[in-house]
Image (cartoon, grey):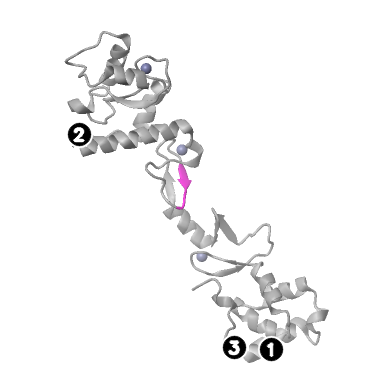
Amino acid sequence: MRNDDIWEEPAVEQEGDLSAVAMGLVGDLTMEDVHLDQLRQAIFERVEHLDQIPALLRKLGATDWALWLADMRAHIGVCTQCHRYVRMADATTLPELVWLGDRVFCHACAQQVLAEHTFTCEACGHDFHARHPPSPFIVCPDCESPGLTLAMTSLAAQLQRARRLDLPATLTLREWLDTLEYFDWRCAYCRREEFACMDHFVPVTQGGGTTKDNCVPACVSCNSTKGGRHPNIHPSRTEGYARVAHYLAQFE
Ligand SMILES: [Zn+2]
Ligand SMILES: [Zn+2]
Ligand SMILES: [Zn+2]
């Protein structure tokens, strides 16, 4: 059912009922004598099925149809999900409707929608609501930041790269963030430069996977200096290498 359906002129089956309602509303007054607010209120109180409104307005002799419909439409809320029409008693408080993002729902549907669209943030662990699951990782709006975006971009790319080469690809966003936080979002080798890319301690070209025990943040310079050397075959004597090896060893 389209939201507009109600506004198409209905086939009036309850002539008698409508006449009674019309009489009860305005008695022998004409439309011109009735205050807009009064009539609107009376309609809401007495008309059970809101699809009767257009016919009722005609019954009352309303001549400015379009204006009336626009007015009524502004005071009626339609649940996006079940299409139930609910009255907005007050255009500012909307007590019978729940807004989720830019859509409006009745209370029953809102509960259902919230349950179906609740996600757990992979970064902070809190539940949040979203119309669609965020991609490539489930991250809440509160956690979004340029740093996190870089972390997610690097992780997504390296997980994909490892999978393509049939290597282990098990590093989770939370694990990657833990490692980034451990190194203060700086290069794990020089500790000076900011994190710019994900470094595989055992290079992907040497069979190293994208896993918690093989990935650390690096700057472009340290990453390219390190190159494709296997740390066990060509162990470096630098402090940075020892630090990274020590850090990663705890996860093996
Ligand atoms: Zn509903
Ligand atoms: Zn979060
Ligand atoms: Zn560095």
Q: Residue at x 40, y 42 (%)?
A: 138
- Residue matched to label 3: 12
Q: Residue at x 29, y 9 (%)?
A: 238
The x, y position of residue 51, in whole percent, is: 59, 78
Nearest the viewer among 203 and 117 is 203
Residue 120 position (above or below residue 173)? below
Nearest the viewer among 183 and 34 is 183
| Residue 177 circle label | none
Front label number (3 vs 1): 3
Q: Is residue 28 left or right of residue 130?
A: right
The x, y position of residue 82, in whole percent, is: 49, 67
Amino acid at the residue labelled 2: Leu
Q: CA distance from mark 2 to mark 1?
A: 77 Å
- Which image quadrant is residue 13 in? bottom right
Front label number (2 vs 1): 2
Q: Residue at x 67, y 57 (%)?
A: 93
SS category of the residue bearing label 1:
helix
The reply to whether the C-beta atoms of the residues labelled 3 and 1 are less than 8 Å apart is no
Residue at the left extreme? 233
Amino acid at the residue labelled 1: Ser
- Residue matched to label 2: 167
The tag earlier along the polypeptide, 2 or 1, is 1
- Which image quadrant is residue 102 in? bottom right
